[in-house]
Image (tube, grey):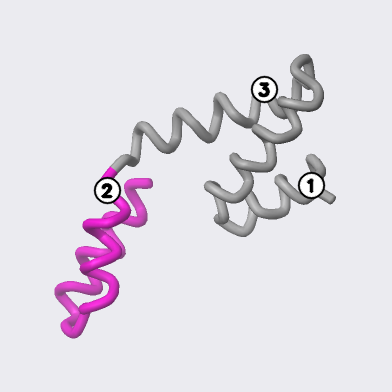
Amino acid sequence: MKTLTLAQIYEFQGLKEEALEIYKEILKKDPKNPDARAAIRRLSGMRRHFLGVNEAMKGLFERMESEEEFARFERWLVQL
């Protein structure tokens, strides 16, 4: 059963896309649901803001071998 609680749990665990899909399903069933509407606006804005950034840094994260690369990744995380 897809509920606001499940979507919130996904969101808090960093599973933003999964949470967004649940919020959209909730909104289809209840178009006036204020919590789902707010969450969709919030998550959609985050997705636009960070579009492409995560893929580039994911590559760095997967191949980090030096302290310099680790420091670069850490600086990027702090900026978020």
Give the x, y percent position of residue 16: 55, 48
Asked whether residue 12 is drawn in magenta, I would say no
Answer with the quarter of the image where residue 73 lies. Answer: bottom left
Q: In the structure shown, which secondary structural element does the residue marked by tag 3 occupy?
A: helix
Q: Quadrant of residue 41?
A: top right
Number of marks: 3
Q: Nearer the viewer, residue 69 or 27?
A: 27
Q: Nearer the viewer, residue 32 or 41?
A: 32
Q: Look at 55% across and 29% down and name the residue there.
A: 42
Q: CA distance from mark 1 to mark 3?
A: 15 Å
The dot on residue 2 is 1
> Which amino acid type is marked by label 1?
Lys
For label 2, the residue is 53
User: Callout 2: helix, strand or loop?
Assistant: helix
| Quadrant in which residue 34 is drawn | top right
Q: Which residue is mark 3?
A: 37
Label 3 near label 1: C-beta < 8 Å?
Answer: no
Where residue 22 sits in the image (x, y, percent)? 68, 42
> Disc 1 or 3, which lies upstream in sequence?
1
Where does residue 32 sit, x and y in percent of width and height?
A: 78, 15
Q: Residues within 10 Å of mark 2 (few under 14, many from 20)?
A: few
Q: Classify residue 59 as left or right of residue 17.
A: left
Sequence order check: which comes first, mark 1 or mark 2?
Answer: 1
Label 3 or label 2, whichever comes before in sequence order: 3
Badge 1: residue crowd in 10 Å (few <14, some 14–19, many ≥20)? few
Q: Residue at x 80, y 22 (%)?
A: 30
Type of the residue with mark 3: Arg
Task: Give the secondary structure at mark 1.
Answer: loop
Q: Residues within 10 Å of mark 3 (few under 14, many from 20)?
A: some
Span colored in magenta: 52-80
